[in-house]
Image (cartoon, coloured by chain):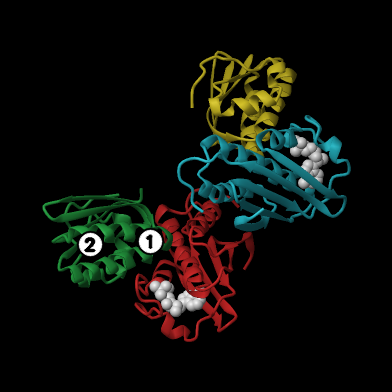
Chain colours: A cyan, B red, C yellow, D green
Amino acid sequence: MKIINETNISFMSKSNNESFARSVVSAFVLQLDPTITELADIKTAVSEAVTNCIVHAYKYEMGTIYITVRIIEGGKIQIKIRDKGCGIENIHEAMEPLFTTMGGERAGLGFAVMQSFMDKIRVNSKVGKGTTITMEKSIIRRAKNNE
Amino acid sequence: MKIINETNISFMSKSNNESFARSVVSAFVLQLDPTITELADIKTAVSEAVTNCIVHAYKYEMGTIYITVRIIEGGKIQIKIRDKGCGIENIHEAMEPLFTTMGGERAGLGFAVMQSFMDKIRVNSKVGKGTTITMEKSIIRRAKNNE
Amino acid sequence: MSVKISHENGKITAKLMGEIDHHTAKAMREEIDSEAEKIKPAVLYLDFSEVQFMDSSGIGLVMGRFRQMELLGGKLRVINVPEHLERIMALSGLGALGVLTNEGKVKK
Amino acid sequence: MSVKISHENGKITAKLMGEIDHHTAKAMREEIDSEAEKIKPAVLYLDFSEVQFMDSSGIGLVMGRFRQMELLGGKLRVINVPEHLERIMALSGLGALGVLTNEGKVKK
Ligand SMILES: Nc1ncnc2c1ncn2[C@@H]1O[C@H](COP(=O)(O)OP(=O)(O)O)[C@@H](O)[C@H]1O
Ligand SMILES: Nc1ncnc2c1ncn2[C@@H]1O[C@H](COP(=O)(O)OP(=O)(O)O)[C@@H](O)[C@H]1O
């Protein structure tokens, strides 16, 4: 697994950073020349994971959200989104579509979207310590790439 | 000096990350609703500082470039760009317009651009340790801000 | 503005603009709800034609308005879903609520 | 493509496209130089009308082409500098080289 390019970003868990996180990840992924649909899929998945850090992990406090984006040889994107928030008690249950601990305006579809829009997702979490979501997606190779 | 929002980014000193750095900083600064000219000024200054890390600081090696962007109460942007590269021997001389240690295609105008396009610039450097450029610019307040 | 509201004959149309995420959905929700409570419309149309991006917060926004319209005794209709949002709409199961229509479908 | 090259009557026009930074300037420079060495033009025009962004690497590109054209016994002319690049062009002192012209000036 050769890493061709990598960036690390961290920012405060303020909700107006949700769009910032999407912009950063897409600016980095652009060097692989993704299709508009691939880029939209990645932005959507990033938006879900970052929002979860803000509304669930750091519900009662201001915290820091960490993102690592890697471009792997062969055209794969790996995105890690990490918080040091409350953690998830039952990951299996949390990942079920429509499951939410918030009700109200949360649809309980964040994980379902991440699963459907990315090729792979792995969730690591420890109650009281935080959560790391690792997602991967292969970008279809087209004409010219910038490596 | 109250910090309203902050992000930290790091990435490899590859030249195709120059445009990535500009995109990240502008995506973050957008929340202050800058004018197109203000945004272009900031992008240009960031481009100079990041390029210097790539072509001077890490001339013979791959290294990591660190950026911190802060939004300060009152509408000020503070941008810190840091490398752990070779450092600058004579900062005063380095900042003179047209001075360059590279010749060829470098114009020796990087610092002149940063000085002219930002309100303030501070350079800290230690030979063999690296360089930190800190720049500030106030964004003119307009209709609606997002704090 | 992130939502443009118009009404006619006891029906409200809320045209959502730009990107819908957890941050922007809040303002949209507040504007739509205050208008709906005032007018108590027979139908609330959510028009997605000008939505460039949405994540599941957009689904939450629809589900929340669905519940609100049930309380107010009216109906909810989602209209003009652009092609690029079809997948997330499909995934949401909103179809089962019967709020999605093909009225005035636009391509994006 | 980041540069479109055309020639006529022993003059070359290189239209630069998009963003000029240290990364993109490299490919632009190589293309322009290889064409100039082949044609040995009386004038090389660098057309900035389609440049959205440039930092001082753009100035370096102009200065380098100025030196190259002196070697080849021709002239360099910078044309169509859009308004948003005027400040960085002014700062560069390129005016002193006499390469900036007002020919076909465009607004951006
Ligand atoms: N980063 C996180 N930290 C803590 N809990 C989380 C995190 N992400 C998700 N969860 C939990 O998993 C549940 C399901 O998440 P999700 O599928 O995204 O739906 P929603 O965000 O709409 O609730 C959340 O309601 C929350 O309890
Ligand atoms: N981050 C850095 N690390 C080491 N040296 C630097 C750095 N930034 C600038 N310099 C030195 O300062 C000089 C002037 O920089 P600048 O004004 O940007 O012109 P240029 O990059 O065109 O040489 C450079 O030639 C280099 O010697």
The residue carrying mark 2 is D37
Badge 1 crowding class, 10 Å Cα cut-off, few under 14, some 14 to 19, many 20 or more, is some
Residue drawn at x 32%, y 61% as measured from the top left? D29
Query: Label 2 vs label 1: CA separation?
Result: 16 Å
Give the percent coordinates (x, y) of residue A138.
62, 41
**Quarter holding residue B100:** bottom left
Q: In this view, does A48 lie to the left or right of B135?
A: right
The residue carrying mark 1 is D26
Q: In this view, does B49 lie to the left or right of B73?
A: left
**C58 vs B18: above or below:** above
**D85 vs B107: above or below:** above
User: For numbered disc 1, what is the local secondary structure?
Assistant: helix
Q: Is residue B33 visible?
A: yes
Identify the subunit bearing mark 1.
D
Give the percent coordinates (x, y) of residue A83.
76, 53
Q: Which of marks 2 and 1 is in front?
A: 2
Q: Are marks 2 and 1 on the same chain?
A: yes
